[in-house]
Image (cartoon, rainbow, N blue to C red):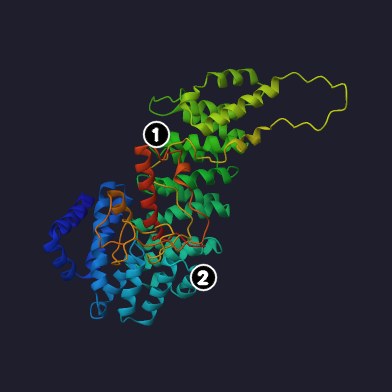
């Protein structure tokens, strides 16, 4: 009920400002902090799973950007407006607008230090961002700003100082519970805990995420980290604990998670985990048995392809419907059948003359050579793209050779208005919303064709890929650390 009231107020604001005559009036009469607060309310509903609020986010980002570009030193004498400027920048706003507005603002030294750190962060200068933000204690700041600063600092320190990063992400959650900030902090905690080998923290963060944010548009990124963490921590995470976490999911998401775990585990030679996950995927829930799913049949066979029941495994592999598998899984099926054939093949007779070196039979673990992508052919848990390299940050347009970072329209250097991922999913933005080019120097972004096995030539898949990409762009402004 409360969520509906929040969305109702935001809708009322948009209706009030709809149309050319009233929009300009609202943007000039409303204070920046009022517009940014409305943006945060909408984003919190998105984190809770209200995907219908995405277009509202796009509109509010545009309105906030326009208002901040017109703001003068007098506006920023109000501390709440300066904080709103910084929160806007970390909420998917235009870094060009943030930097320009900061140059006009009069604020205390600490606020300017925070602004410098955020601008460096947004423009892909992580070392300078860490230097500027290092002395800042997020817990001493107003909660709306402190939560974002904690999230950014935690993300920046994730690789070099993971223990401190986890503490900062906890601060972010404490300062902003039930928000998009908490969702991002929890999601990042899962990956950091897995990288540290902290099974207890990994299980706790995963449980908390599933309980509160399973339907977030960024839940697919959590699924990526969760599956990878289960593989990494397979010796420390019991099957019972895994079952407890997945039991909180709806049946379809649970099945997909188990299919992904079964595939990764089979390729990595973790036969016990692969067999368990494949069996759970086949078992289903609420009477919905998935034993006819060819993927579950294939992955369960991979875990026993060299076992003593090889005849049964060969028979099972022979009954799998190849037409229902992706190309990558058909390659896995071919490899599994070849290995099974090697197991039962009679020994070759010794040649009359000394033979040259012969190729050894492909071992079970070399199935991975047929396809390194553990995602191919499997549907995502939620329709968004895996988190891109964290180094991708935003910089002003005028570099057409680089991929857009926060953009809803083709490059338009005639203005510096904000654009948002949600706006891009809706189509070209107004002319006042330019693109902001990426300043990433990190590894290349994965090509859409490999994202979750989707076909970029299929209209439906292409729409999903575009939505994934656009949602990921705003998430990077929520604390994805440049390396």
The residue carrying mark 1 is: 252
- The image shows residue 230, relative to residue 280, as above or below, that is below
Q: Tag 2's secondary structure?
A: helix
Residue 60 x/y as whole percent: 24, 59
Q: Tag 1's secondary structure?
A: helix
**Residue contact between numbered discs 1 and 2, judged by CB atoms under 8 Å:** no
Q: Earlier in the sequence, mark 1 or mark 2?
A: 2
10 Å crowding of disc 1: few (<14), some (14-19), many (20+): few
The residue carrying mark 2 is: 127
Spatial separation of the CA atoms under disc 1 and disc 2: 42 Å
Residue 263 x/y as whole percent: 54, 35
- The answer to whether residue 72 is left or right of residue 263 is left
Q: Nearer the viewer, residue 4 or 248?
A: 4
- The image shows residue 18, relative to residue 49, as above or below, that is below
- The answer to whether residue 441 is left or right of residue 434 is right
In this view, the mark in front (1 or 2):
2
Note whether residue 142 is visible: no
10 Å crowding of disc 2: few (<14), some (14-19), many (20+): some
Note whether residue 320 is visible: yes
Residue 371, picture quadrant: top right
Residue 209 x/y as whole percent: 41, 49
Q: Outermost residue, left direction? A: 21
Q: Nearer the viewer, residue 326 or 183?
A: 326
Residue under the image location 54 percent in, 41 percent down: 373
Residue 99, picture quadrant: bottom left
Residue 312, picture quadrant: top right
- The answer to whether residue 476 is left or right of residue 431 is right
Q: Nearer the viewer, residue 132 or 449?
A: 449
- The image shows residue 305, relative to residue 213, as above or below, that is above
Residue 196 x/y as whole percent: 57, 55
Residue under the image location 59 percent in, 27 percent down: 334
Q: Nearer the viewer, residue 19 or 414?
A: 414
């Amino acid at each position: 009920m409360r969520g509906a009231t929040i969305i109702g107020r935001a809708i009322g604001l948009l209706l009030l400002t709809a149309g050319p005559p009233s929009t300009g009036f609202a943007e000039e009469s409303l204070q920046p902090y009022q517009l940014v607060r409305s943006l945060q309310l909408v984003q919190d509903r998105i984190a809770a799973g209200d995907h219908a609020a995405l277009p509202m986010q796009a509109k509010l980002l545009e309105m906030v950007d326009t208002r901040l570009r017109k703001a003068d030193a007098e506006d920023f004498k109000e501390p709440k407006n300066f904080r709103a400027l910084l929160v806007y920048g970390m909420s998917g706003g235009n870094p060009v607008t943030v930097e320009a507005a900061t140059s006009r603002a009069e604020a205390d030294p600490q606020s300017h230090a925070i602004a410098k750190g955020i601008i460096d962060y947004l423009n892909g200068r992580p070392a300078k961002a860490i230097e500027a933000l290092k002395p800042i204690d997020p817990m001493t700041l107003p909660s709306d700003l402190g939560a974002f600063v904690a999230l950014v600092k935690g993300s920046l320190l994730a690789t070099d100082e993971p223990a401190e990063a986890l503490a900062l992400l906890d601060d972010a959650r404490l300062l902003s519970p039930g928000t998009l900030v908490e969702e991002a902090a929890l999601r990042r905690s899962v990956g950091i805990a897995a990288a540290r080998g902290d099974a207890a923290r990994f299980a706790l963060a995963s449980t908390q995420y599933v309980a509160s944010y399973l339907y977030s548009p960024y839940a697919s990124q959590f699924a990526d980290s969760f599956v990878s963490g289960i593989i990494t921590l397979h010796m420390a995470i019991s099957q019972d604990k895994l079952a407890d976490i997945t039991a909180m999911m709806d049946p379809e998401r649970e099945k997909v998670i188990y299919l992904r775990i079964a595939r990764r585990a089979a390729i990595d030679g973790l036969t016990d985990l692969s067999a368990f996950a494949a069996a759970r995927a086949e078992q289903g829930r609420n009477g919905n048995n998935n034993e006819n799913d060819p993927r579950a049949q294939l992955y369960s066979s991979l875990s026993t392809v060299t076992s003593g029941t090889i005849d049964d495994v060969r028979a099972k592999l022979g009954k799998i419907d190849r037409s229902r598998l992706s190309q990558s899984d058909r390659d896995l099926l071919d490899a599994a059948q070849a290995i099974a054939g090697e197991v039962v093949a009679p020994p070759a007779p010794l040649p009359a003359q000394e033979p040259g070196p012969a190729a050894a039979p492909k071992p079970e673990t070399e199935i991975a050579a047929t396809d390194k992508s553990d995602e191919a052919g499997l549907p995502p848990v939620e329709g968004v793209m895996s988190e891109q390299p964290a180094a991708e940050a935003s910089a002003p347009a005028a570099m057409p050779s680089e991929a857009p970072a926060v953009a809803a329209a083709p490059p338009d250097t005639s203005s510096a208005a904000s654009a948002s991922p949600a706006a891009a999913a809706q189509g070209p933005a107004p002319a006042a919303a330019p693109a902001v080019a990426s300043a990433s120097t990190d590894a290349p972004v994965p090509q859409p064709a490999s994202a979750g096995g989707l076909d970029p030539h299929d209209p439906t898949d292409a729409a999903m890929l575009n939505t994934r990409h656009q949602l990921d762009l705003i998430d990077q402004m929520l604390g994805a650390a440049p390396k």
